[in-house]
Image (spheres, helix red, strand yellow):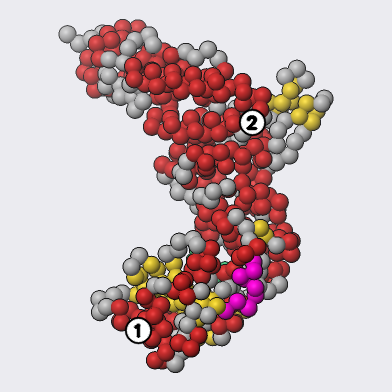
Amino acid sequence: MKNCLSNRVFRLISDIVAEKGQEAYVIGGYVRDALLGRPSKDIDIVTVGNGIELAREVAKKLGAQRKITVYRNFGTAMLQHEGYEIEFVGARKESYRNDSRKPVVENGSLEDDQKRRDFTVNALAISLNKESFGRLSDPFSGIEDLRNKIIRTPLDPEATFSDDPLRMLRAVRFATQLEFNIEQKTFNALANNRERILIVSAERITDELNKILISKTPSKGFTLLERSGLLKHILPELDNLKGVEIREGKKHKDNFLHTVKVVDSVSRLSDNLWLRWAALLHDIGKPATKRYSTETGWSFHGHDYLGAKMVPEIFKKLRLPLNDKMKYVKKMVQLHLRPINLAKEEITDSAIRRLLYEAGDDLEDLMLLCEADITSQNREIVKKYLNNFQLVREKLKEIEEKDAIRNFQPPVKGEEIMETFGIGPCREVGKIKNAIKEAIIEGTIGNNYPQAREFMLKKGEELGLTPKK
Ligand code: ATP
Ligand code: MG
């Protein structure tokens, strides 16, 4: 265990607490991750005594200028050292009331402190005390659970989750991040306490969802959320996608299972959290647009548009940023069918130019999403489309080089239109500008100034305008 403590700062803390006659331990995530061989930049130190005072003394020994950040409400203090964030806290005992995640806190022993930890693998502590330096304290068989890749609560899981329901999401997140399984009794408690998640703030829920999404295989987390019933409470729009309906022998696919497959596929191709959100939400418009017809079977017409419209509301509810990230996700959801629809038909230059214009710099991401969407469908569909999809990619490249439509800048600007016809800002200016853009996309004229100027004059005349002499 000593190799977990190669950091010089552990020796320093050890010396200081020896002098004070106080106990200190490294505890929680850092110990877990060190044993798993995962690099980690957060170190939690628990001391039987005052954590803030200990942090001050460590800071003093490390250098005169060093600052600590004190969180008096939590009785903790944080110190930055060589890229690590070291947090100090006094060992404590916690008890909970029914209506809040905030416990009543009193001073306690190391063991009290380990009992308040969420999972056995997060309750491991390593001694920094002289006589037992490096010795592991593992009262709940956390090492065995690490070895067997199990998430389990140290105490009764029903009480653990009822006390602080955020722990339910942490269980799912750790299972996904570490590729562990949730022990059955712990999982049952997750399902039993699912409604308690409603007392957790949207920000905390979203933090965990983001951590699940940036894991290697996010489907694991979302499947656990669905199976435990938590998903219905935190992202009902996604939960609504599950299930298969059969009529007259025709069935549609389970859109929840399909969605999480698409998220995994996109995750293999890109680390972009927002592209993963787009994959997660790409089909959320399906339940409301689902129709059945005897002739053509199941359809979800317009689910791309409806889904895009649902994105801002979902972002707001989850306290996700309402800035360009939201716009990006909305755009991806709205356009997710476009590349594949192109591949189904004859691929015209104008359709390609329109896609380049609408997707702009997000075109590559859109292609990744669309490809992930195809490869997550059944094998027949995949075979049918993938070849054509390659053609779309080639054609996009060709047209992009030829016509420079991405980040389209109109070759004739509004000022020039006003100046030419001697008019102020009015609807006609917008109409002419739009007509020029459309003509370029349709291929009626090229993306260049002389042709755009000529087209502007013609269009102006049609609208009853005459050029100034
Ligand atoms: P990561 O930093 O990757 O999220 P971590 O295990 O370090 O993982 P933190 O949130 O940094 O998680 O918390 C540090 C430690 O504090 C945990 O390992 C756990 O022992 C304890 N802990 C954190 N949150 C809770 C909670 N809600 N209930 C009980 N113990 C918790
Ligand atoms: Mg941590």
Q: What amino acid type should be assigned to the residue bearing mark 1?
A: Glu
- Front residue of 225 and 371: 371
- Left or right? Give the position of 290 relative to 101: right
Quarter of the image where the C terminus is located: top left
SS assignment at label 1: helix
Residue 227 lies, in percent from the top left, at 71, 51
- Front residue of 171 and 388: 388
Residue with the mark numbered 1: 57
Q: What amino acid type should be assigned to the residue bearing mark 2?
A: Gln
Q: Reply yes or no: does residue 140 show up in magenta.
A: yes
- Is 288 situated above or below 114? above
Residue with the mark numbered 2: 377
Residue 121 lies, in percent from the top left, at 59, 68
- Residue 430, quarter of the rendered image: top left
Residue 123 lies, in percent from the top left, at 58, 73
Q: Reply yes or no: does residue 88 show up in magenta.
A: no
Which residue is found at the position 47% from the left and 75% from the top? 2
Answer whether residue 105 is visible to the viewer in this image.
no
In space, the residues marked 1 and 2 are separated at their CA atoms by 60 Å
- Residue 9, quarter of the rendered image: bottom left
- Left or right? Give the position of 403 relative to 114: left
Looking at the image, the residue that sits furthest to the right is: 248
- Is 440 situated above or below 253? above
Answer whether residue 377 is visible to the viewer in this image.
yes
Which residue is found at the position 45% from the left and 63% from the top? 40
Work out whether mark 1 precedes mark 2 in sequence or the reverse, and give the earlier one: 1
Give the residues drawn in magenta, as a range.
137-145
